[in-house]
Image: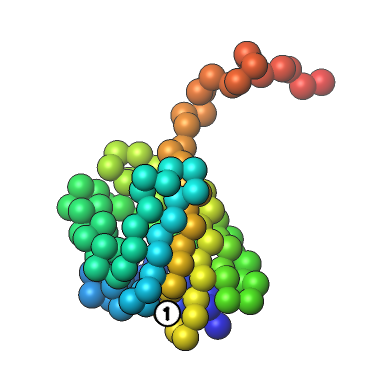
């Protein structure tokens, strides 16, 4: 079951265990940011370098997957990163698992706006 591998990844991330994080990824891994293609990367070595930097910059970061659906070899999850470089992030990550390793991730993560952030189109309308 792919979800158990993703849960193992989340434990490794929250324990800041770089070896355990890297062990979740296949040698052909690709990380894709469809809305930010300049962030795309490949390989478990780059995963390790990325998380090493994140753990250094955000020593209090925690990662949760609040909801998930497993379809075939993919896990579609709603993720929440807390205290990531001074901000919280929420979004969807679609993870492809084959042969017991993560082979692809597509990230749709964004910083969380403050509750009083402006609404596109002007102030919120009052409800009846």
Relative horizontal placement of residue 28, taking residue 17 as reference (left or right): right
The residue lying furthest to the right in this view is 128
The x and y percentages for residue 65 are 49, 61
The residue at which mark 1 appears reads as: 101
Q: Quadrant of residue 125?
A: top right
Out of 52 and 117, give the one closest to the viewer: 52
Q: Is residue 124 visible?
A: yes
Q: Is residue 57 left or right of residue 108?
A: left
Q: Residue at x 65, y 72 (%)?
A: 71
Quarter of the image with the N terminus in it: bottom right
Instruction: Place residue 76 in its image quadrant.
Output: bottom right
Name which residue lies at 53% across and 78% down: 2
In the rendered image, the vertical position of residue 115 relative to residue 36, given as above or below: above
Residue at the extreme top: 122
Task: Identify the residue at image location x=29%, y=39%.
Answer: 86
Q: Picture coordinates of residue 100 (x, y %)?
A: 45, 84
Vertical position of residue 80 compared to residue 95: above or below: above
Toward the viewer: 33 or 17? Answer: 33
Depth order, front residue of 62/69: 69
As helix, strand or loop, the secondary structure at mark 1 comes to strand
Measured along the vertical axis of the image, is residue 120 above or below residue 15? above
**On-image quarter of the C terminus:** top right
Res 80 seen here: no
User: Where, by quadrant of the figure, is residue 69 drawn?
Assistant: bottom right
Measured from the top left, where is residue 103 in percent x and y? 44, 72
Residue 88 sits above or below residue 69 on the image: above
For residue 115, side relative to residue 63 (left or right)? right
Q: Residue at x 47, y 86 (%)?
A: 99
At label 1, counting other C-alpha atoms closer than 10 Å, the crowd grade (few under 14, some 14-19, many 20 or more) is: some
Q: Position of residue 79 (x, y in %)?
A: 49, 55
Q: Residue furthest left?
A: 56
């Amino acid at each position: 079951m792919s979800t158990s591998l993703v849960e193992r990844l989340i434990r490794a991330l929250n324990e800041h265990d770089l070896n355990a994080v890297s062990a979740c990824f296949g040698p052909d891994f690709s990380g894709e940011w469809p809305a930010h293609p300049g962030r795309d990367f490949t390989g478990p070595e780059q995963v390790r370098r990325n998380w090493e930097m994140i753990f250094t910059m955000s020593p209090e970061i925690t990662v949760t997957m609040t909801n998930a659906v497993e379809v075939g070899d993919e896990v579609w999850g709603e993720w929440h990163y807390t205290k990531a470089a001074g901000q919280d992030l929420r979004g969807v990550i679609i993870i492809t698992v084959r042969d017991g390793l993560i082979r692809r991730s597509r990230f749709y993560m964004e910083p969380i706006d403050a509750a009083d952030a402006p609404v596109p189109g002007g102030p919120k309308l009052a409800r009846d």
